């Protein structure tokens, strides 16, 4: 696979990504997949998905976990409901992520990923240590399936995420960097954060956003790629500078507007390929 292939975030029967058919129609060679519902994660289901991907000449580069009961309605709701951090749902969701890891193995995909949730700020607290332990557990399971675990950015500052990954101390734990999430959550300037995370970044999203009026308290606004505050040119230059060579995966989750979603993904493909092609000739 060539360096920096374009990708797109997709869904089969769960999540907000586009259908595989849209990726095929747009000629996109790589995808990340939102894990299907629990009843559709068998080896046979994975084989059916793999057959379709092979027919489309598309490579799955990551399978993302997501859970019933998660809500991104606002930042306080994310704190309460998202990922493996909420204690009431933690063990059930850990079991689900292990099932998703098995599905990814059957699919032949070497990466599983998720939003871990808002990690407690006090690294000396029991709640922080508990999140470290559940992440270690999942890393160990993924290691047994020959996989890495990628944590998507957004909820933590880059510095806090580096410290957390260091505390987990597992060599298959990395970052899926989403620059727009840094803006949407008010977690820090995305280019600065990317430099701070450096070679921990092993997968990325291409998404854009504008800062909210109260960063970290109220959501920013997600917008079409190139129309926000990320600075896509600088983003790609920084990816090159840190040595990232993997897929450039577009995420535009507006399935309630399928034609707009397809059009904006097509626009993002053009933005990315134009910058990439110019960078390759300079």
Image (cartoon, rainbow, N blue to C red):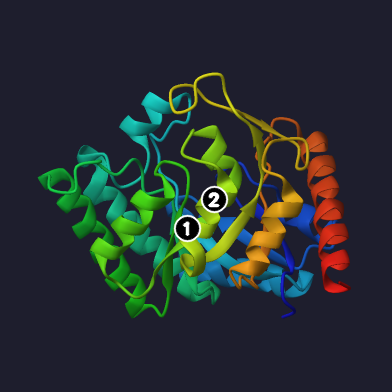
Residue 249 x, y percent position in the rendering: 67, 58
Using the image, determine if residue 73 lies above or below residue 28.
above
Tell me what residue is drawn at x 84 percent, y 49 percent: 266
Residue 66 x, y percent position in the rendering: 44, 47
**Mark 2, other Cα within 10 Å: few <14 / some 14–19 / many ≥20:** few
Tell me what residue is drawn at x 47 percent, y 43 percent: 154
Q: Nearer the viewer, residue 35 or 40?
A: 35
Residue 157 x, y percent position in the rendering: 41, 45
Question: Left or right of 260: which side holds 169?
Answer: left
The single residue placed furthest to the top in the displayed view is: 213
- Can residue 81 be seen at all in this image of the molecule? yes
Q: Nearer the viewer, residue 213 or 3?
A: 213
- Residue at numbered disc 2: 192
Tell me what residue is drawn at x 41 percent, y 80 percent: 146
Mark 1 touching mark 2, by CB under 8 A?
yes
Using the image, determine if residue 208 lies above or below residue 142.
above
Tell me what residue is drawn at x 88 percent, y 58 percent: 274
Q: Nearer the viewer, residue 83 or 171?
A: 171
Using the image, determine if residue 102 lies above or below residue 113.
below
Cα–Cα gap, marks 1 and 2 = 6 Å
Of helix, strand and loop, which one carries label 1? helix
Of helix, strand and loop, which one carries label 2? helix
- Can residue 41 be seen at all in this image of the molecule? no
Specify the quadrant that holds the C terminus: bottom right
- Residue at numbered disc 1: 196
Which numbered marker is on residue 142? Answer: none
């Amino acid at each position: 696979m060539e360096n920096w292939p374009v990708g797109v975030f997709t869904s089969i029967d769960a999540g907000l990504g586009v259908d595989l058919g849209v990726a095929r129609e747009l000629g996109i060679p790589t995808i990340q997949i939102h894990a299907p519902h629990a009843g559709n994660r068998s080896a046979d289901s994975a084989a059916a998905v793999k057959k379709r991907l092979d027919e489309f000449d598309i490579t799955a580069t990551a399978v993302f976990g997501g859970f019933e009961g998660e809500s991104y309605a606002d930042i306080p709701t994310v704190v309460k409901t998202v990922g493996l951090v909420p204690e009431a749902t933690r063990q059930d969701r850990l079991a689900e992520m292990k099932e998703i890891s098995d599905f990814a193995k059957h699919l032949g995909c070497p990466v599983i990923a998720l939003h871990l949730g808002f990690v407690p700020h006090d690294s000396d607290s029991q709640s922080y240590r508990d999140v470290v332990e559940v992440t270690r557990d999942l890393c160990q399971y993924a290691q047994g399936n020959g996989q890495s675990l990628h944590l998507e950015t957004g909820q933590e500052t880059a510095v806090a995420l580096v410290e957390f990954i260091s505390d987990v101390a597992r060599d298959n734990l990395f970052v899926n960097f989403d620059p727009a999430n840094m803006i949407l959550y008010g977690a820090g300037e995305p280019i600065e954060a990317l430099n701070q995370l450096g070679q921990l970044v092993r997968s990325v999203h291409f998404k854009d956003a504008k800062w909210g009026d109260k960063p970290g308290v109220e959501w920013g606004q997600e917008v079409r790629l190139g129309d926000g505050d990320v600075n896509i040119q600088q983003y790609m230059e920084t990816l090159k500078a840190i040595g990232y060579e993997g897929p450039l995966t577009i995420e535009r989750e507006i399935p309630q507007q399928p034609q707009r979603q397809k059009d904006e993904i097509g626009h993002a493909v053009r933005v990315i390929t134009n910058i990439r092609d110019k960078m390759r000739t300079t």
